[in-house]
Amino acid sequence: MRVACVQFDCQFAKPQENLATALSLMENERADLYILPELFHSGYLFVDEQELHELAEPVPDGKTVQALEDFAHKNGSGIVAGIAEKSGEHFYNSAVFVDETGFRGVYRKIHLYDREKLWFAPGEAPFEIWSFRDVNLGIMICFDWIFPESMRSLALLGADLICHPSNLVLPYCQNAMVTRCLENRVFAATANRIGRDDRDVIAIDFTGQSQITGPDGSILVRASKDQPSLLVQDLPLQQARNKQINEYNQLFTDRRPDFYHLD
Amino acid sequence: MRVACVQFDCQFAKPQENLATALSLMENERADLYILPELFHSGYLFVDEQELHELAEPVPDGKTVQALEDFAHKNGSGIVAGIAEKSGEHFYNSAVFVDETGFRGVYRKIHLYDREKLWFAPGEAPFEIWSFRDVNLGIMICFDWIFPESMRSLALLGADLICHPSNLVLPYCQNAMVTRCLENRVFAATANRIGRDDRDVIAIDFTGQSQITGPDGSILVRASKDQPSLLVQDLPLQQARNKQINEYNQLFTDRRPDFYHLD
């Protein structure tokens, strides 16, 4: 399966421009599945709730998801994209999954990072997986990575590929994904943004280096720190089904939950 | 607290020589706590059960643990050391903890690696922690590292320092400990062996590079791949009590077990 991470500088409060930039990168090369950054249409650094009222969109009826559905339908592709979601009185830091058949589902970020807690409600549904062609996709967003329970949950549910829309600020995740993939024997595609959100009172730099990681912990491909790019890789995703690491050890059946303390 | 990892080439079936080598390295510099490799007295690569009948020792009454207790008493230190343990009809890949007061406890490896499953029984007690002076020690052995549940369990139980006797064969652990420490905000001391166990029918090379890792994922000190050494570091272990990583995120209270799938 050809998987592509879309990396670019998401401009704050310019949803139409961000959508156009993303689609333009995606049109450079056909892929079965595109992963876009977290909050790719809105930008990241909100400084008051009013901005979310203006930028967040209903899912799946908002303009951005509709445009992604159109692209997916036209190109016969799947897309996982980070969206600022408006639902009733709540805002969620979400990721939608659409494919050629239309809207497939939404994941609402379970572990909010830093000042996201001021504006977004945390996801209130368990991690889940979605079938896509002959494989299973898991979705987590950015900071979810630091909790080993996130990818462990998705992998135990049967995910072959972890789709990971991100706006990474800390320098740790790209290296950590080596261990995350190794411990779960899954593939992961981290689509990170580049550039800087500068909102006068506060500014944040993002780390780029979108990365596709293999189930043996190998970094299959990594983008630059500061250039927009479409990071494309053909992935033998079925390999993620094999959790056997030698004649005697199978990573999942060797787990011994009776002896763990995870409450 | 001054912590020291003891790295050397543990000779197969030469318990007296291995003990002498370890104590000799330990006498080079006083530490509050010494960590020795997995199966440090027996060597690693058993090829039949009879060898374990000859080399495994009762805990704490065997000669090796008694000698460690003597050292600990004389030097006012703690020691965590990997031991082939004999208990009734069973053999365990264990780690003992002794200090100046004598024998404190034993951890029996929960996740056996590869052909260890042929000879050893898996540990049948949950992960636990031991108080040592003003901090809490957790113990895991070698391959336990690949299961995030191991260090997570110890950290949630309150471990400040993970003592990690090892005979590492795969090349992944030292880098993975960066993520393990970061995700749990704990210190870890991985005491690995060097050299090669060559038993004619089978041979294994060990990776050395014993490592002490900080709660921010920094590699505080790392030994060479092939030289015996005593890797010493003064550690501000109380720092592991602070799980706050910014104004809004605390790594443990931010966990959301209701949404995980970890069965």
Image (spheres, coloured by chain):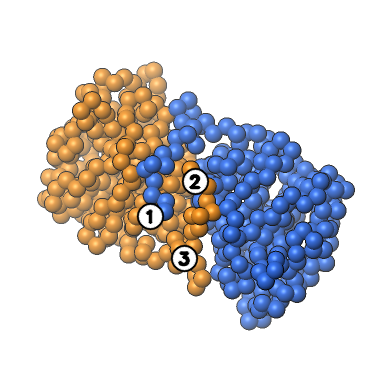
Chain colours: A blue, B orange
Q: Mark 2 — on which chain does it sit?
A: B
Q: Quadrant of the N terminus of chain B?
A: bottom left
First reached walking from the N terminus: tag 3 or tag 2: 3
Q: Residue at x 59, y 59 (%)?
A: A124
Q: Residue at x 49, y 36 (%)?
A: A251
Indicate left or right for A172 with B14 as reference: right
Badges 1 and 3, same chain? yes
Badges 3 and 2, same chain? yes
Q: Which residue type carries mark 1?
A: Ala
Q: Which residue is mark 2?
A: B262
How far across and down, in percent of the image, does residue A59 sit? 75, 60
Where A130 sits versus B88, above or below? Answer: below
Q: Nearer the viewer, mark 3 or mark 2?
A: 2
Mark 1, Cα crowd under 10 Å, few <14 / some 14-19 / many 20+, is many
Q: Which residue type carries mark 3?
A: Gln
Q: Nearer the viewer, residue A232 or A253?
A: A253
Quarter of the image where one finds residue A133 = top right
Q: Which residue is mark 3?
A: B250
